[in-house]
Image (tube, rainbow, N blue to C red):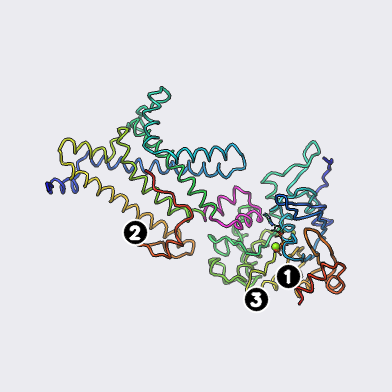
Amino acid sequence: MKFDWSYFWQSLLAPSPQFLNGLALTIIISVVAMALAFLLGLVIALMGRSRFLPFKLFASLYIWVIRGTPLLVQLVIIYTGFAAAGLFRFEDVDLFGAIIKGAVQAAIVGLMLNESAYISEIVRSGLESVDRGQNEAALSLGMTPMHAMRKIIVPQAIRTMVPPLGNSFNGLMKSTSILSIIGVSEMFQVGSTMSASTFKVFEIYIVVALYYLLLTTVWTFIQTAIENTLNVRAGLPPAESVFKRLFGVRSRKQQTTSTPALQPADIA
Amino acid sequence: MTMYTEPAPTERGPIVQAVNVCKSFGDKRILTDVNLEVARGEVVVMVGPSGAGKTTMLRTLNGLEAIDSGEIRVNGELLGQRVNKQGKLVERSARDLARQRANIGFVFQHFNLFPHMSVLENIWHAVVEVKHESKSEAVAYARELLGRVGLADKADARTRSLSGGQQQRVAIARALAMRPALMLFDEPTSALDPEMVGEVLAVMRDLANAGMTMIIVSHEMGFTREVADRVVVMDAGRIIESGPPAQVFATPQHERTRQFLSNVLA
Ligand SMILES: Nc1ncnc2c1ncn2[C@@H]1O[C@H](COP(=O)(O)OP(=O)(O)OP(=O)(O)O)[C@@H](O)[C@H]1O
Ligand SMILES: [Mg+2]
Protein backbone atom coordinates (compact mmCIF):
# COMPACT_ATOMS: atom_id res chain seq x y z
CA MET A 1 0.00 0.00 0.00
CA LYS A 2 1.16 3.47 -0.84
CA PHE A 3 0.32 5.90 1.95
CA ASP A 4 2.19 9.14 2.37
CA TRP A 5 2.17 9.46 6.14
CA SER A 6 3.94 12.79 6.34
CA TYR A 7 1.53 14.32 3.83
CA PHE A 8 -1.37 12.83 5.80
CA TRP A 9 -0.21 14.24 9.15
CA GLN A 10 0.53 17.58 7.62
CA SER A 11 -2.93 17.82 6.03
CA LEU A 12 -4.59 16.71 9.23
CA LEU A 13 -2.71 18.84 11.75
CA ALA A 14 -1.78 21.84 9.63
CA PRO A 15 -4.48 22.06 6.99
CA SER A 16 -4.15 24.58 4.18
CA PRO A 17 -6.08 27.87 4.34
CA GLN A 18 -8.34 26.67 1.49
CA PHE A 19 -9.20 23.56 3.46
CA LEU A 20 -9.98 25.59 6.58
CA ASN A 21 -12.17 27.89 4.49
CA GLY A 22 -14.00 24.82 3.25
CA LEU A 23 -14.46 23.62 6.81
CA ALA A 24 -15.75 27.03 7.88
CA LEU A 25 -18.19 27.10 4.96
CA THR A 26 -19.47 23.63 5.87
CA ILE A 27 -20.17 24.80 9.41
CA ILE A 28 -21.72 28.11 8.40
CA ILE A 29 -24.00 26.57 5.78
CA SER A 30 -25.09 23.84 8.22
CA VAL A 31 -25.90 26.25 11.04
CA VAL A 32 -27.69 28.81 8.89
CA ALA A 33 -29.67 26.18 6.98
CA MET A 34 -30.65 24.44 10.22
CA ALA A 35 -31.81 27.65 11.89
CA LEU A 36 -33.91 28.64 8.87
CA ALA A 37 -35.22 25.08 8.49
CA PHE A 38 -36.35 25.13 12.11
CA LEU A 39 -38.39 28.29 11.58
CA LEU A 40 -39.88 27.03 8.33
CA GLY A 41 -40.52 23.60 9.87
CA LEU A 42 -42.40 25.28 12.71
CA VAL A 43 -44.56 27.18 10.23
CA ILE A 44 -45.27 24.01 8.21
CA ALA A 45 -46.13 22.10 11.40
CA LEU A 46 -48.53 24.82 12.54
CA MET A 47 -50.11 24.91 9.08
CA GLY A 48 -50.58 21.15 9.31
CA ARG A 49 -52.40 21.59 12.63
CA SER A 50 -54.51 24.49 11.39
CA ARG A 51 -58.26 24.19 11.04
CA PHE A 52 -58.02 26.07 7.73
CA LEU A 53 -58.12 23.38 5.04
CA PRO A 54 -55.87 25.01 2.38
CA PHE A 55 -53.08 25.31 5.01
CA LYS A 56 -53.47 21.68 5.97
CA LEU A 57 -53.37 20.56 2.32
CA PHE A 58 -50.35 22.71 1.57
CA ALA A 59 -48.44 21.27 4.54
CA SER A 60 -49.23 17.68 3.53
CA LEU A 61 -48.30 18.31 -0.09
CA TYR A 62 -45.07 20.03 0.89
CA ILE A 63 -43.99 17.24 3.21
CA TRP A 64 -44.90 14.59 0.64
CA VAL A 65 -42.95 16.19 -2.20
CA ILE A 66 -39.86 17.20 -0.24
CA ARG A 67 -39.47 13.93 1.60
CA GLY A 68 -40.24 11.90 -1.50
CA THR A 69 -37.45 13.35 -3.64
CA PRO A 70 -33.65 13.24 -3.15
CA LEU A 71 -31.83 16.27 -1.79
CA LEU A 72 -29.38 16.08 -4.68
CA VAL A 73 -32.17 16.44 -7.23
CA GLN A 74 -33.76 19.28 -5.25
CA LEU A 75 -30.47 21.17 -5.19
CA VAL A 76 -29.85 20.79 -8.89
CA ILE A 77 -33.39 21.91 -9.71
CA ILE A 78 -33.13 24.98 -7.47
CA TYR A 79 -29.72 26.10 -8.66
CA THR A 80 -29.19 24.80 -12.17
CA GLY A 81 -32.72 23.97 -13.29
CA PHE A 82 -34.32 27.28 -12.35
CA ALA A 83 -31.50 29.22 -13.97
CA ALA A 84 -31.65 27.16 -17.14
CA ALA A 85 -35.38 27.68 -17.42
CA GLY A 86 -34.90 31.41 -16.94
CA LEU A 87 -37.07 31.26 -13.79
CA PHE A 88 -34.64 32.42 -11.19
CA ARG A 89 -30.91 32.79 -10.92
CA PHE A 90 -28.97 32.96 -7.65
CA GLU A 91 -26.60 35.93 -8.06
CA ASP A 92 -23.64 36.67 -5.81
CA VAL A 93 -24.64 39.23 -3.20
CA ASP A 94 -22.64 41.53 -1.00
CA LEU A 95 -23.68 41.11 2.63
CA PHE A 96 -21.90 43.63 4.91
CA GLY A 97 -18.75 43.41 2.81
CA ALA A 98 -18.73 39.62 2.45
CA ILE A 99 -19.54 38.21 -0.98
CA ILE A 100 -22.07 35.38 -0.71
CA LYS A 101 -21.83 33.20 -3.79
CA GLY A 102 -25.01 32.31 -5.64
CA ALA A 103 -24.23 28.62 -5.18
CA VAL A 104 -23.95 29.09 -1.42
CA GLN A 105 -27.35 30.81 -1.30
CA ALA A 106 -28.87 28.00 -3.35
CA ALA A 107 -27.25 25.48 -1.02
CA ILE A 108 -28.74 27.14 2.05
CA VAL A 109 -32.17 27.45 0.46
CA GLY A 110 -32.08 23.83 -0.75
CA LEU A 111 -30.96 22.42 2.59
CA MET A 112 -33.48 24.60 4.41
CA LEU A 113 -36.38 23.42 2.26
CA ASN A 114 -35.31 19.80 2.49
CA GLU A 115 -34.68 19.82 6.22
CA SER A 116 -37.83 21.80 7.07
CA ALA A 117 -40.07 18.97 5.87
CA TYR A 118 -38.41 16.57 8.30
CA ILE A 119 -38.35 19.16 11.07
CA SER A 120 -42.06 19.89 10.68
CA GLU A 121 -42.71 16.23 11.43
CA ILE A 122 -40.46 16.39 14.49
CA VAL A 123 -42.28 19.50 15.67
CA ARG A 124 -45.67 17.91 15.02
CA SER A 125 -44.90 14.78 17.00
CA GLY A 126 -43.27 16.90 19.72
CA LEU A 127 -46.42 18.97 20.11
CA GLU A 128 -48.54 15.83 20.09
CA SER A 129 -46.39 14.31 22.82
CA VAL A 130 -47.72 16.88 25.29
CA ASP A 131 -50.80 15.61 27.08
CA ARG A 132 -54.08 17.17 25.92
CA GLY A 133 -54.91 17.95 29.53
CA GLN A 134 -52.13 20.54 29.57
CA ASN A 135 -53.85 22.57 26.88
CA GLU A 136 -57.22 22.18 28.58
CA ALA A 137 -55.83 23.30 31.93
CA ALA A 138 -54.27 26.33 30.26
CA LEU A 139 -57.53 27.23 28.48
CA SER A 140 -59.53 26.77 31.67
CA LEU A 141 -57.30 29.39 33.33
CA GLY A 142 -58.31 31.89 30.65
CA MET A 143 -55.26 31.59 28.41
CA THR A 144 -55.89 32.02 24.70
CA PRO A 145 -54.93 29.03 22.50
CA MET A 146 -51.94 31.06 21.30
CA HIS A 147 -50.77 31.79 24.83
CA ALA A 148 -51.24 28.15 25.84
CA MET A 149 -49.16 27.08 22.85
CA ARG A 150 -46.31 29.46 23.67
CA LYS A 151 -46.15 29.17 27.43
CA ILE A 152 -47.45 25.67 28.17
CA ILE A 153 -47.20 23.36 25.15
CA VAL A 154 -44.01 24.45 23.36
CA PRO A 155 -41.77 24.56 26.46
CA GLN A 156 -42.72 20.96 27.19
CA ALA A 157 -42.55 19.82 23.57
CA ILE A 158 -39.04 21.24 23.10
CA ARG A 159 -37.60 18.60 25.39
CA THR A 160 -38.89 15.75 23.24
CA MET A 161 -37.95 17.61 20.07
CA VAL A 162 -34.28 18.21 20.86
CA PRO A 163 -32.97 14.63 20.39
CA PRO A 164 -34.44 14.13 16.90
CA LEU A 165 -33.59 17.72 15.93
CA GLY A 166 -30.01 17.12 17.00
CA ASN A 167 -29.86 13.96 14.93
CA SER A 168 -31.22 15.88 11.97
CA PHE A 169 -28.50 18.47 12.36
CA ASN A 170 -25.92 15.72 12.45
CA GLY A 171 -27.27 14.38 9.17
CA LEU A 172 -27.43 17.87 7.71
CA MET A 173 -23.72 18.49 8.36
CA LYS A 174 -22.86 15.30 6.53
CA SER A 175 -25.15 16.03 3.60
CA THR A 176 -23.35 19.32 2.94
CA SER A 177 -20.75 17.12 1.21
CA ILE A 178 -23.06 16.78 -1.78
CA LEU A 179 -23.10 20.55 -2.26
CA SER A 180 -19.97 20.09 -4.38
CA ILE A 181 -22.37 19.10 -7.16
CA ILE A 182 -23.51 22.72 -7.50
CA GLY A 183 -19.97 24.00 -7.04
CA VAL A 184 -20.00 25.12 -3.40
CA SER A 185 -16.42 25.10 -2.16
CA GLU A 186 -17.21 23.41 1.12
CA MET A 187 -14.85 20.97 2.76
CA PHE A 188 -15.49 18.00 0.50
CA GLN A 189 -15.15 20.08 -2.65
CA VAL A 190 -11.83 21.54 -1.43
CA GLY A 191 -10.64 18.00 -0.66
CA SER A 192 -11.56 16.84 -4.16
CA THR A 193 -9.68 19.71 -5.74
CA MET A 194 -6.61 18.99 -3.62
CA SER A 195 -6.67 15.31 -4.47
CA ALA A 196 -6.88 16.08 -8.16
CA SER A 197 -3.79 18.28 -8.05
CA THR A 198 -1.66 16.16 -5.69
CA PHE A 199 -2.89 12.63 -6.50
CA LYS A 200 -2.85 11.91 -2.73
CA VAL A 201 -6.42 10.70 -3.07
CA PHE A 202 -6.57 8.25 -0.18
CA GLU A 203 -4.71 10.51 2.27
CA ILE A 204 -6.88 13.51 1.54
CA TYR A 205 -10.23 11.76 1.75
CA ILE A 206 -9.21 10.16 5.04
CA VAL A 207 -8.43 13.64 6.37
CA VAL A 208 -11.79 14.87 5.06
CA ALA A 209 -13.55 11.97 6.76
CA LEU A 210 -11.78 12.70 10.05
CA TYR A 211 -12.87 16.33 9.94
CA TYR A 212 -16.51 15.32 9.38
CA LEU A 213 -16.11 12.93 12.30
CA LEU A 214 -14.74 15.77 14.41
CA LEU A 215 -17.74 17.96 13.52
CA THR A 216 -20.36 15.32 14.31
CA THR A 217 -18.58 14.29 17.51
CA VAL A 218 -18.32 17.83 18.81
CA TRP A 219 -22.00 18.30 17.96
CA THR A 220 -22.91 15.14 19.86
CA PHE A 221 -21.27 16.59 22.98
CA ILE A 222 -23.16 19.86 22.54
CA GLN A 223 -26.45 18.06 21.93
CA THR A 224 -26.01 15.90 25.01
CA ALA A 225 -25.30 18.98 27.11
CA ILE A 226 -28.47 20.66 25.80
CA GLU A 227 -30.58 17.58 26.50
CA ASN A 228 -29.16 17.25 29.99
CA THR A 229 -29.87 20.88 30.80
CA LEU A 230 -33.47 20.52 29.61
CA ASN A 231 -33.98 17.24 31.46
CA VAL A 232 -32.60 18.61 34.70
CA ARG A 233 -34.82 21.66 34.37
CA ALA A 234 -37.82 19.36 33.91
CA GLY A 235 -36.78 17.29 36.92
CA LEU A 236 -35.98 14.21 34.82
CA PRO A 237 -32.92 11.94 34.79
CA PRO A 238 -30.02 12.96 32.50
CA ALA A 239 -29.91 11.96 28.84
CA GLU A 240 -27.99 8.95 27.58
CA SER A 241 -24.21 9.33 27.76
CA VAL A 242 -22.10 10.68 24.90
CA PHE A 243 -20.12 7.46 24.88
CA LYS A 244 -23.24 5.39 24.28
CA ARG A 245 -24.43 7.72 21.56
CA LEU A 246 -21.17 7.78 19.66
CA PHE A 247 -20.50 4.06 19.76
CA GLY A 248 -24.08 2.92 19.47
CA VAL A 249 -24.14 0.91 22.70
CA ARG A 250 -27.69 1.47 23.79
CA SER A 251 -29.43 -0.29 26.59
CA ARG A 252 -32.82 -1.72 25.76
CA LYS A 253 -34.49 0.45 28.38
CA GLN A 254 -33.21 3.65 26.84
CA GLN A 255 -34.34 2.60 23.42
CA THR A 256 -37.90 2.22 24.57
CA THR A 257 -38.05 5.27 26.80
CA SER A 258 -36.02 7.91 25.03
CA THR A 259 -36.72 7.19 21.39
CA PRO A 260 -39.38 9.59 20.18
CA ALA A 261 -42.43 8.25 18.42
CA LEU A 262 -41.15 9.47 15.12
CA GLN A 263 -37.53 9.08 14.18
CA PRO A 264 -36.96 10.74 10.85
CA ALA A 265 -34.33 8.98 8.84
CA ASP A 266 -31.13 10.91 8.35
CA ILE A 267 -31.35 12.85 5.18
CA ALA A 268 -29.29 11.97 2.07
CA MET B 1 -82.74 31.13 13.40
CA THR B 2 -84.25 32.63 16.51
CA MET B 3 -83.71 36.29 17.21
CA TYR B 4 -81.96 36.92 20.49
CA THR B 5 -81.47 39.94 22.63
CA GLU B 6 -78.73 39.44 25.11
CA PRO B 7 -79.33 40.60 28.68
CA ALA B 8 -76.51 42.54 30.27
CA PRO B 9 -74.22 40.48 32.53
CA THR B 10 -75.57 40.61 36.02
CA GLU B 11 -74.25 40.04 39.48
CA ARG B 12 -77.64 38.84 40.62
CA GLY B 13 -79.71 35.95 39.36
CA PRO B 14 -78.47 32.44 38.71
CA ILE B 15 -74.78 32.07 37.92
CA VAL B 16 -75.33 29.19 35.51
CA GLN B 17 -78.31 28.80 33.23
CA ALA B 18 -78.10 25.92 30.79
CA VAL B 19 -81.15 25.58 28.58
CA ASN B 20 -81.87 22.60 26.30
CA VAL B 21 -78.22 21.78 25.86
CA CYS B 22 -77.61 19.11 23.21
CA LYS B 23 -74.29 17.65 22.22
CA SER B 24 -73.26 14.79 19.93
CA PHE B 25 -69.89 13.26 19.16
CA GLY B 26 -70.19 12.18 15.53
CA ASP B 27 -73.64 10.65 15.32
CA LYS B 28 -73.57 9.58 18.97
CA ARG B 29 -75.93 11.66 21.12
CA ILE B 30 -74.21 12.45 24.42
CA LEU B 31 -76.37 15.22 25.92
CA THR B 32 -80.07 15.59 25.25
CA ASP B 33 -81.97 18.72 26.32
CA VAL B 34 -80.08 19.25 29.53
CA ASN B 35 -81.46 22.08 31.66
CA LEU B 36 -79.51 23.21 34.68
CA GLU B 37 -79.77 26.32 36.79
CA VAL B 38 -77.32 27.00 39.58
CA ALA B 39 -77.71 29.82 42.09
CA ARG B 40 -74.88 31.88 43.55
CA GLY B 41 -73.25 30.07 46.46
CA GLU B 42 -75.00 26.81 45.63
CA VAL B 43 -73.11 23.50 45.74
CA VAL B 44 -74.41 21.05 43.14
CA VAL B 45 -73.14 17.50 42.88
CA MET B 46 -73.71 15.60 39.63
CA VAL B 47 -73.93 11.83 39.92
CA GLY B 48 -74.82 9.07 37.52
CA PRO B 49 -73.50 5.92 35.90
CA SER B 50 -70.36 5.86 33.78
CA GLY B 51 -70.96 7.27 30.30
CA ALA B 52 -74.00 9.28 31.44
CA GLY B 53 -72.45 12.48 30.10
CA LYS B 54 -71.42 14.13 33.40
CA THR B 55 -67.93 15.05 32.25
CA THR B 56 -69.21 16.28 28.90
CA MET B 57 -71.84 18.45 30.59
CA LEU B 58 -69.29 19.95 32.98
CA ARG B 59 -66.91 20.67 30.10
CA THR B 60 -69.62 22.53 28.18
CA LEU B 61 -69.98 24.86 31.18
CA ASN B 62 -66.56 26.42 30.52
CA GLY B 63 -66.56 25.99 26.76
CA LEU B 64 -64.05 23.12 26.63
CA GLU B 65 -66.80 21.35 24.71
CA ALA B 66 -68.86 23.40 22.24
CA ILE B 67 -72.58 22.65 22.27
CA ASP B 68 -74.66 21.76 19.22
CA SER B 69 -77.84 23.50 20.30
CA GLY B 70 -79.38 25.16 23.32
CA GLU B 71 -77.63 27.89 25.25
CA ILE B 72 -75.46 28.33 28.29
CA ARG B 73 -75.24 31.51 30.25
CA VAL B 74 -72.73 32.20 32.96
CA ASN B 75 -73.29 35.36 34.96
CA GLY B 76 -76.10 36.09 32.52
CA GLU B 77 -73.67 36.20 29.58
CA LEU B 78 -73.86 33.68 26.73
CA LEU B 79 -70.88 31.34 26.95
CA GLY B 80 -68.86 30.70 23.80
CA GLN B 81 -71.50 32.40 21.67
CA ARG B 82 -72.65 35.94 21.17
CA VAL B 83 -75.39 37.76 19.33
CA ASN B 84 -74.15 39.66 16.29
CA LYS B 85 -75.60 42.85 14.82
CA GLN B 86 -78.09 40.90 12.73
CA GLY B 87 -79.39 39.25 15.89
CA LYS B 88 -77.89 35.88 15.03
CA LEU B 89 -75.96 33.60 17.37
CA VAL B 90 -72.30 33.37 16.37
CA GLU B 91 -69.20 31.84 17.92
CA ARG B 92 -67.19 34.10 20.21
CA SER B 93 -63.58 34.87 19.38
CA ALA B 94 -60.88 32.82 21.12
CA ARG B 95 -59.89 35.88 23.14
CA ASP B 96 -63.44 36.55 24.25
CA LEU B 97 -63.99 32.93 25.27
CA ALA B 98 -60.70 33.02 27.19
CA ARG B 99 -61.95 36.09 29.09
CA GLN B 100 -65.10 34.17 30.04
CA ARG B 101 -63.16 31.10 31.12
CA ALA B 102 -60.89 33.15 33.36
CA ASN B 103 -63.92 33.56 35.61
CA ILE B 104 -64.63 29.82 35.83
CA GLY B 105 -62.28 27.46 37.69
CA PHE B 106 -61.95 23.88 36.47
CA VAL B 107 -60.39 21.05 38.46
CA PHE B 108 -59.52 17.96 36.43
CA GLN B 109 -59.53 14.32 37.40
CA HIS B 110 -55.83 14.09 36.50
CA PHE B 111 -54.80 17.48 37.97
CA ASN B 112 -53.00 18.68 34.81
CA LEU B 113 -50.44 20.74 36.68
CA PHE B 114 -47.77 22.32 34.48
CA PRO B 115 -44.67 20.17 35.03
CA HIS B 116 -42.24 22.77 33.68
CA MET B 117 -43.13 25.23 36.43
CA SER B 118 -42.67 25.16 40.17
CA VAL B 119 -45.72 24.63 42.37
CA LEU B 120 -45.90 28.34 43.13
CA GLU B 121 -45.59 29.41 39.50
CA ASN B 122 -48.37 27.00 38.56
CA ILE B 123 -50.58 29.08 40.83
CA TRP B 124 -49.52 32.63 39.90
CA HIS B 125 -48.71 32.21 36.20
CA ALA B 126 -52.17 32.87 34.77
CA VAL B 127 -52.92 35.59 37.33
CA VAL B 128 -49.95 37.56 36.01
CA GLU B 129 -50.16 36.63 32.35
CA VAL B 130 -53.92 36.54 31.87
CA LYS B 131 -55.25 39.01 34.42
CA HIS B 132 -52.10 41.17 34.24
CA GLU B 133 -51.93 41.63 38.00
CA SER B 134 -48.63 42.62 39.52
CA LYS B 135 -46.32 39.69 40.03
CA SER B 136 -45.54 40.48 43.65
CA GLU B 137 -49.23 40.55 44.58
CA ALA B 138 -49.94 37.40 42.58
CA VAL B 139 -47.07 35.55 44.25
CA ALA B 140 -48.20 36.68 47.69
CA TYR B 141 -51.74 35.50 46.98
CA ALA B 142 -50.39 32.20 45.57
CA ARG B 143 -48.51 31.64 48.84
CA GLU B 144 -51.61 32.43 50.84
CA LEU B 145 -53.67 29.92 48.83
CA LEU B 146 -50.94 27.30 49.10
CA GLY B 147 -51.11 27.75 52.86
CA ARG B 148 -54.87 27.40 52.81
CA VAL B 149 -54.63 24.01 51.04
CA GLY B 150 -51.98 22.96 53.58
CA LEU B 151 -48.93 22.99 51.30
CA ALA B 152 -47.08 26.15 52.33
CA ASP B 153 -43.78 24.25 52.45
CA LYS B 154 -44.11 23.01 48.84
CA ALA B 155 -43.91 26.38 47.07
CA ASP B 156 -40.63 25.67 45.30
CA ALA B 157 -41.18 21.94 44.79
CA ARG B 158 -41.47 20.32 41.38
CA THR B 159 -45.02 19.21 40.68
CA ARG B 160 -43.79 15.70 39.81
CA SER B 161 -42.41 15.25 43.31
CA LEU B 162 -45.84 15.69 44.92
CA SER B 163 -48.32 12.94 45.75
CA GLY B 164 -51.62 12.81 43.86
CA GLY B 165 -53.51 14.37 46.74
CA GLN B 166 -50.99 17.19 46.99
CA GLN B 167 -51.11 17.79 43.23
CA GLN B 168 -54.87 18.03 43.32
CA ARG B 169 -54.74 20.54 46.16
CA VAL B 170 -52.28 22.64 44.14
CA ALA B 171 -54.64 22.38 41.15
CA ILE B 172 -57.47 23.71 43.30
CA ALA B 173 -55.27 26.57 44.52
CA ARG B 174 -54.29 27.32 40.91
CA ALA B 175 -57.95 27.61 39.89
CA LEU B 176 -58.80 29.73 42.96
CA ALA B 177 -55.95 32.14 42.24
CA MET B 178 -57.99 33.51 39.34
CA ARG B 179 -60.72 34.46 41.86
CA PRO B 180 -63.38 32.64 39.84
CA ALA B 181 -67.08 33.15 40.39
CA LEU B 182 -67.70 29.45 39.84
CA MET B 183 -65.68 26.28 40.35
CA LEU B 184 -66.21 23.09 38.36
CA PHE B 185 -64.77 19.78 39.59
CA ASP B 186 -64.65 16.61 37.48
CA GLU B 187 -64.21 13.63 39.79
CA PRO B 188 -61.38 15.37 41.65
CA THR B 189 -60.65 12.40 43.88
CA SER B 190 -61.20 9.41 41.64
CA ALA B 191 -57.57 9.22 40.43
CA LEU B 192 -56.27 9.29 44.02
CA ASP B 193 -55.16 6.55 46.37
CA PRO B 194 -57.86 6.10 49.04
CA GLU B 195 -55.73 7.59 51.82
CA MET B 196 -55.46 10.88 49.89
CA VAL B 197 -59.12 11.37 49.13
CA GLY B 198 -59.84 12.91 52.54
CA GLU B 199 -57.31 15.75 52.25
CA VAL B 200 -58.78 16.90 48.92
CA LEU B 201 -62.38 16.64 50.11
CA ALA B 202 -61.42 18.66 53.20
CA VAL B 203 -60.21 21.51 50.98
CA MET B 204 -63.42 21.35 48.95
CA ARG B 205 -65.52 21.34 52.10
CA ASP B 206 -63.77 24.53 53.31
CA LEU B 207 -64.44 26.10 49.96
CA ALA B 208 -68.14 25.22 50.09
CA ASN B 209 -68.38 26.62 53.62
CA ALA B 210 -66.73 29.83 52.40
CA GLY B 211 -69.65 30.27 50.01
CA MET B 212 -68.05 29.30 46.69
CA THR B 213 -70.43 28.25 43.94
CA MET B 214 -69.43 24.72 42.98
CA ILE B 215 -70.56 22.09 40.49
CA ILE B 216 -68.95 18.80 41.33
CA VAL B 217 -69.03 15.46 39.51
CA SER B 218 -68.35 12.93 42.22
CA HIS B 219 -68.94 9.39 43.36
CA GLU B 220 -68.20 10.34 46.99
CA MET B 221 -71.67 9.85 48.44
CA GLY B 222 -70.75 10.66 52.06
CA PHE B 223 -69.23 13.97 50.96
CA THR B 224 -72.23 14.68 48.74
CA ARG B 225 -74.71 14.10 51.53
CA GLU B 226 -72.77 16.46 53.76
CA VAL B 227 -71.85 19.30 51.38
CA ALA B 228 -74.32 19.32 48.48
CA ASP B 229 -77.27 21.71 48.45
CA ARG B 230 -78.62 19.74 45.52
CA VAL B 231 -77.90 16.46 43.80
CA VAL B 232 -78.43 16.15 40.06
CA VAL B 233 -78.72 12.66 38.64
CA MET B 234 -77.72 12.13 35.02
CA ASP B 235 -78.40 9.07 32.92
CA ALA B 236 -77.93 8.52 29.20
CA GLY B 237 -77.33 12.21 28.50
CA ARG B 238 -80.31 13.54 30.43
CA ILE B 239 -80.93 14.91 33.89
CA ILE B 240 -83.45 12.46 35.27
CA GLU B 241 -83.71 13.72 38.81
CA SER B 242 -82.67 16.61 40.99
CA GLY B 243 -83.16 17.58 44.62
CA PRO B 244 -81.59 17.88 48.07
CA PRO B 245 -79.32 14.91 48.83
CA ALA B 246 -81.49 13.68 51.71
CA GLN B 247 -84.50 13.51 49.43
CA VAL B 248 -82.77 12.00 46.38
CA PHE B 249 -80.94 9.40 48.45
CA ALA B 250 -83.91 8.45 50.65
CA THR B 251 -86.76 8.58 48.17
CA PRO B 252 -85.43 8.42 44.60
CA GLN B 253 -88.21 9.11 42.11
CA HIS B 254 -86.67 7.39 39.15
CA GLU B 255 -86.00 3.68 38.76
CA ARG B 256 -82.56 4.34 37.21
CA THR B 257 -81.63 6.51 40.21
CA ARG B 258 -82.58 3.66 42.54
CA GLN B 259 -80.40 1.23 40.55
CA PHE B 260 -77.49 3.64 40.45
CA LEU B 261 -77.68 4.42 44.17
CA SER B 262 -77.90 0.78 45.16
CA ASN B 263 -74.70 0.19 43.17
CA VAL B 264 -72.68 3.04 44.66
CA LEU B 265 -74.01 2.83 48.18
CA ALA B 266 -73.62 -0.96 48.34
N1 LIG C 1 -64.25 13.39 22.69
C1 LIG C 1 -65.15 12.39 22.60
N2 LIG C 1 -65.39 11.80 21.40
C2 LIG C 1 -66.29 10.79 21.27
N3 LIG C 1 -67.02 10.32 22.30
C3 LIG C 1 -66.85 10.86 23.51
C4 LIG C 1 -65.89 11.91 23.72
N4 LIG C 1 -65.92 12.26 25.04
C5 LIG C 1 -66.84 11.44 25.61
N5 LIG C 1 -67.39 10.61 24.72
C6 LIG C 1 -68.45 9.64 24.97
O1 LIG C 1 -69.52 10.32 25.57
C7 LIG C 1 -70.16 9.50 26.53
C8 LIG C 1 -70.29 10.27 27.81
O2 LIG C 1 -69.01 10.52 28.29
P1 LIG C 1 -68.72 11.31 29.63
O3 LIG C 1 -67.25 11.27 29.81
O4 LIG C 1 -69.36 12.63 29.58
O5 LIG C 1 -69.42 10.40 30.72
P2 LIG C 1 -69.31 10.44 32.30
O6 LIG C 1 -70.70 10.51 32.80
O7 LIG C 1 -68.38 11.49 32.72
O8 LIG C 1 -68.73 9.01 32.63
P3 LIG C 1 -67.64 8.57 33.73
O9 LIG C 1 -68.39 8.39 35.02
O10 LIG C 1 -67.13 7.27 33.19
O11 LIG C 1 -66.60 9.61 33.79
C9 LIG C 1 -69.34 8.24 26.65
O12 LIG C 1 -70.00 7.22 25.95
C10 LIG C 1 -68.04 8.58 25.97
O13 LIG C 1 -67.51 7.45 25.34
MG1 LIG D 1 -66.45 11.53 33.61
Asked whether mark 1 and ligand 1 are closer than 8 Å, the reply comes as yes
Q: Secondary structure at mark 2?
A: loop
- The residue indicated by pointer 2 is A248
Residue drawn at (43%, 54%), measured in percent from left and top? A163
Above or below A83: residue A18: below
Q: Which residues are magenta?
A: A129-156
Q: Which residue is tagged 3?
A: B194
Please, what is the three-letter code of the amino acid marked with disc 2? Gly
Please name the residue shown 77% across and 53% down the image.
B74
Residue matched to label 1? B219
Residue A154: image location, x then y, percent: 53, 52
Q: CA distance from mark 3 to mark 1?
A: 13 Å
User: Can residue A129 be seen at all in this image of the molecule?
Assistant: yes
Q: Are marks 2 and 3 in contact (CB under 8 Å)?
A: no
* Residue at mark 1 shares a chain with residue at mark 2: no
Front residue (pair A154, A53): A53
Kind of residue at disc 1 = His
Q: Indicate the secondary structure of the residue bearing disc 1.
A: loop
Magenta-span inclusion, residue B106: no
Name the residue located 30 percent from the left edge and 36 percent from the top edge.
Answer: A180
Mark pair 2, 3: CA separation: 45 Å
- Residue B179, how many percent across, how many down? 70, 59
Numbered disc in front, either 2 or 3? 2
Quarter of the picture containing the C terminus of chain A is top left
Name the kind of residue labelled 3 in the image. Pro
Figure quadrant of residue B199: bottom right
